[in-house]
């Protein structure tokens, strides 16, 4: 290859985002005038709160359009500090918080700060698609810890132990989980916290769906247990909670030394997030939170509709998720079966048939660590969800 077009070594190691690929395909189908039921995409259908939109407009009108502190404006970091205490009982000073360009950026900062070449990172399966790829970017090795439906797609100290060695540096814990919707109880987290303390492991706690938990006891962060605040990086974003995916505002909360290291990294990559989006995020986080309870109730109702619909369809099975807005569908019943003139070997084949033959966009589980699952989302209107389920049933048949 000509040296002027030579690509970096990581290009061959890192896979493209399947979510981005599906979004691109759906957008193309819609431009072509095709009907597509979007049951695979993880974007809330609730709009950005009016208070956030008004704050952004005011920021523009007041010419608040220049650079800010790399770590984010002080009022926003103060608001995040209050929200962490208000919502999940965590206490962080504003100078332990970094505002980032979305939640994915906060994760990238944390992984690149905590990991180096030769380190190993524990990633429970199923996982969000960017976890292993970001670990590879950092030069570390992702180590996948299997789970199953019987365990509720959750890890335990016993399931983690065989994968830990002297190179193990970090556990990435995402809960509520994307894609399974799994939520850990306080007892389960306490046991994991003890395990991490004994094995001297850091934890990245991805809490981007923490506002959407349907269990009566609500959400608990692993950072809240004794000794864990000192070895945990909490990441979150306004994206899912407030319907602000395009505003690209996330954040991390971590011990001061780790925060300062992540801040140095950010100062040489993105620098500060958008000044306008920061003002919008401030209004969203600091304003009334009553609307979140209504959204949570609606998601719970949609979840029940989607679970019932999936279980009605031949060859599909699923658990009832406790959080987030996804259903993790076991499609292994279709393995080796013929459909639409094709033999189904993986869920990728099934997802392709559903999109091309039924106009239903679902996310194949390969990118999440399982080639025999599908991720379906209930962050769509009830009508679109019901129509999508009916289209799936027309192709796959009923139980």
Image (tube, rainbow, N blue to C red):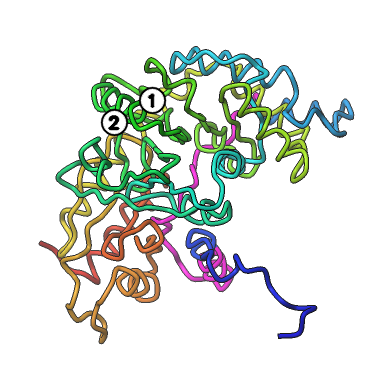
Res 67 quadrant in image = top right
Disc 1 crowd, CA 10 A, few/some/many (<14, 14-19, 20+): many
Point 39% across, 75% down: residue? 356
Q: CA distance from mark 1 to mark 2?
A: 9 Å
| Span highlighted in magenta in the image | 24-51
- Horizontally, residue 220 falls left or right of residue 158, namely right
Disc 2 crowd, CA 10 A, few/some/many (<14, 14-19, 20+): many
- Relative to 183, is 159 above or below? below
The count of marks equals 2
Which residue in the structure is indicated by mark 2?
A: 184
Q: Point out the image quarter for the N terminus.
A: bottom right
- Horizontally, residue 93 falls left or right of residue 166, namely right
User: Where residue 222 is drawn, which disc sits there?
Assistant: 1
**Percent x, y for residue 167?**
42, 46
Is residue 49 inside the magenta stretch? yes
Point 43% across, 18% down: residue? 88
Q: Regarding mark 2 in the picture, which secondary structure is present there?
A: loop
- Relative to 259, is 361 above or below? below
Q: Nearer the viewer, residue 54 or 344?
A: 344
- Relative to 367, is 127 above or below? above
Q: Point out the image quarter for the C terminus.
A: bottom left
Residue furthest toward the front? 166
Question: Is there a contact, CB below 8 Å, between mark 1 and mark 2?
Answer: yes
**Percent x, y for residue 181?**
32, 41
User: Where residue 33 is drawn, which disc sits there?
Assistant: none
Is residue 208 inside the magenta stretch? no
Q: If you read the primary sequence from the N terminus, does the residue marked by circle 1 or circle 2 appear first?
A: 2
């Amino acid at each position: 290859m000509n040296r002027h077009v030579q690509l970096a070594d990581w290009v061959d190691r890192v896979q493209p985002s399947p979510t981005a690929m599906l979004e691109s395909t759906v957008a193309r189908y819609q431009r072509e005038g095709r009907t597509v039921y979007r049951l695979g995409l993880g974007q809330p259908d609730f709009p950005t709160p009016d208070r956030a939109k008004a704050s952004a407009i005011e920021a523009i009108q007041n010419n608040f359009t220049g650079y800010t502190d790399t770590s984010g404006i002080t009022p926003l970091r103060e608001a995040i500090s209050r929200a962490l205490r208000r919502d999940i009982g965590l206490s962080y000073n504003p100078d332990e918080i970094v505002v980032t360009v979305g939640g994915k950026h906060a994760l990238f900062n944390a992984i690149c700060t905590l990991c180096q070449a030769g380190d190993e990172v524990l990633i429970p399966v199923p996982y969000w698609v960017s976890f292993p790829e970001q670990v590879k970017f950092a030069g570390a090795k992702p180590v996948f810890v299997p789970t199953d439906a019987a365990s509720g797609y959750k890890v335990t100290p016993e399931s983690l132990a065989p994968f830990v060695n002297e190179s193990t540096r970090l556990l990435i814990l995402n809960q509520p989980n994307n894609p399974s919707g799994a939520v850990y109880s306080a007892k389960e987290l306490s046991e994991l916290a003890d395990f991490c303390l004994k094995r001297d492991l850091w934890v990245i706690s991805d809490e981007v769906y923490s506002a959407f938990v349907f269990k009566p006891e609500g959400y608990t962060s692993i950072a809240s247990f004794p000794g864990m605040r000192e070895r945990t990086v909490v990441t979150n974003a306004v994206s899912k909670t407030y319907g602000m995916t395009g505003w690209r505002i996330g954040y991390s909360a971590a011990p001061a030394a780790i925060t300062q290291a992540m801040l140095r990294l950010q100062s040489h990559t993105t620098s500060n997030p958008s000044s306008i989006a920061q003002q919008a995020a401030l209004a969203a986080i600091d304003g009334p939170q009553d609307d979140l309870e209504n959204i949570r109730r609606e998601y719970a109702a949609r979840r029940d509709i989607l679970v019932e619909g999936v279980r009605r369809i031949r060859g599909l099975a699923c658990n009832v998720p406790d959080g987030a807005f996804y259903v993790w569908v076991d499609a292994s019943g279709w393995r080796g079966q013929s459909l639409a003139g094709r033999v189904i070997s993986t869920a990728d084949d099934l997802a392709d048939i559903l999109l091309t033959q039924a106009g239903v966009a679902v996310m194949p589980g390969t990118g999440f660590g399982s080639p025999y699952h599908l991720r379906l989302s209930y962050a769509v209107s009830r009508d679109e969800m019901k129509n999508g389920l009916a289209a799936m049933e027309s192709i796959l048949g009923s139980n």
